Image (spheres, rainbow, N blue to C red):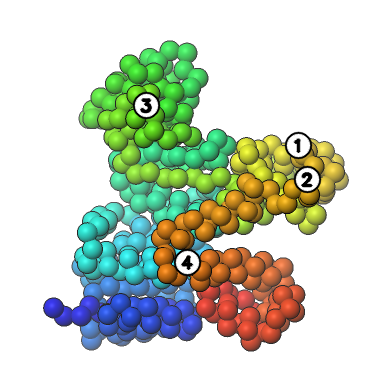
Amino acid sequence: MATATILVVEDDAAVAWSVEQALRGAGWQVVVAADAAAARRHLKRLQPDVVLTDVKMPGESGLDLAAALRQELPGIPVIVTTAFGTMDSAVAAVAAGAFDYLPKPLELDRLLAVVRRALGEDSLAAAAQPAASTPLGDSDLVGAAPAMQEIYRRLAAAAASDLPVLIVGPPGSGKELAARALHRHSARSAAPFVAVSCGALANADDLFGASGAGAASAGGTLFCDEIEALPAPAQVRLLRLLDEAGAPRVIAASARDLTALSAAGAFRQDLAWRLRGTTVAVPALADRLDDLPALVRHLLSRLAQRLGRALAITDGALARLRRHSWPGNVRELRHVIEEAAVLATGGIIDLDHLDLPPIDDSAGPTPSGFTAATAALARKLLLAHPGTAHQQFTDTVEAVLLREAIARTEGNQLRAAELLGINRITLKKRMDQLGIAGRQD
């Protein structure tokens, strides 16, 4: 059996080298191109089995290359990678015909698993290639943490199908925002999106009447929040609705484990399985605190429009927000920021504008804050990457520190190295290894 050939299109030499070594170590032949133009020259003399391309490169982008290859060489799977992961880029990758979408810094074990799937070398079914979908507009989903990258990838894949979707996550984490984003980027975007809270239904029939499935039946989407609270008779009717021709697409959300509820007889097992066409897990805010500054900026931008005045936040106030445990998740953050914006009549939110409980420093780090987040990461890596978990953990945590230093120095590597207390050459080497961009001046 001939050895598979992988074409890697990557303008960052350090990233290209690390990917090449990983792929060669797995037993595949590798050809590297620095941009799309060089990739096209290689394609004239060889037909690779898989193409792995970055999005942002000099000249033609990786998404344009993926779209062109879909037309010219439709049998070649294209895997897209990017350091600028958003819902927009994830859906754009799917629309361009990408086999899969991977955020940077790349997890090499995950990359190898995706390449094996693309080559048909493992038992996982290859994802169907969807047709181009509706162009994206602004999304209320904000964040670039690894957990959010996975959400973008799953929502992008789900948007290209019409199967039911189950969104799970703690209260206030943004499950309805994820549902609305999915609807907005699906083929049903022009039809109604109808949200119903199953826990607040006065009558189970309300889910299927004019204010529920009936309103969404014209090719729309029915969002069933708190699906675990749906009465048993309504569960039977919903199960039937899922199989009716012309019925709305159903997106359900729950803060509880439907499998456990089914085992306890509190929820129909067949409905629980039927709702899981795709499952999207929305993380707690405490598990993605790297996204907190971006979330705050997003909330302040929207509030500034509503209040008709400019808003900003001090570094001290932002640092205090980072130390809160956020049991109410993004919903609680929104409330805190809205109240602070009203109190900050001068437009600058400071510590005294934040209605947060005092911090007990004697108790050590808040368990649901940094400690919980790192513990969750450790559990995930020990399970998914035995043998390399230490390096994976170190790289992930160090990348957060380096990105923060680069952001604080506006991309200046020399100033960032001074801030970190390390040699600039050492910083540049680690940035290259971790796929972090920044100026050298």
User: Label 2 amino acid?
Assistant: Ile
Residue tagged by mark 2?
Answer: 359
Tell me the distance, in whole angstroms, between the alpha carbons under discs 2 and 1.
20 Å
CB-based contact (under 8 Å), mark 2 and mark 4:
no
Tell me the distance, in whole angstroms, between the alpha carbons under discs 3 and 2.
39 Å
At a point 49% along the width and 82% down the height, the residue shown is 14
Q: Residues within 10 Å of mark 1 (few under 14, many from 20)?
A: some
Q: Earlier in the sequence, mark 3 or mark 1?
A: 3
What is the total number of numbered labels drawn onto the structure image? 4
From the viewer's perspective, is the residue at label 2 or at label 4 nearer?
A: 4
At a point 43% along the width and 83% down the height, the residue shown is 17
Tell me the distance, in whole angstroms, between the alpha carbons under discs 3 and 4.
36 Å
- Image location (x, y in percent) of residue 88: 47, 55
User: Label 4 amino acid?
Assistant: Ala
Residue tagged by mark 3?
Answer: 264
Q: Quadrant of residue 327?
A: top right
> Mark 1 falls on what kind of element?
helix
- Image location (x, y in percent) of residue 112: 34, 70
Residue tagged by mark 1?
Answer: 339
CB-based contact (under 8 Å), mark 3 and mark 2:
no
> Mark 3 falls on what kind of element?
loop
- Image location (x, y in percent) of residue 243: 23, 30
Residue tagged by mark 4?
Answer: 389
Q: Earlier in the sequence, mark 3 or mark 4?
A: 3
Q: Nearer the viewer, residue 189 or 10?
A: 10
From the viewer's perspective, is the residue at label 2 or at label 1 nearer?
A: 2
At a point 35% along the width and 51% down the height, the residue shown is 157
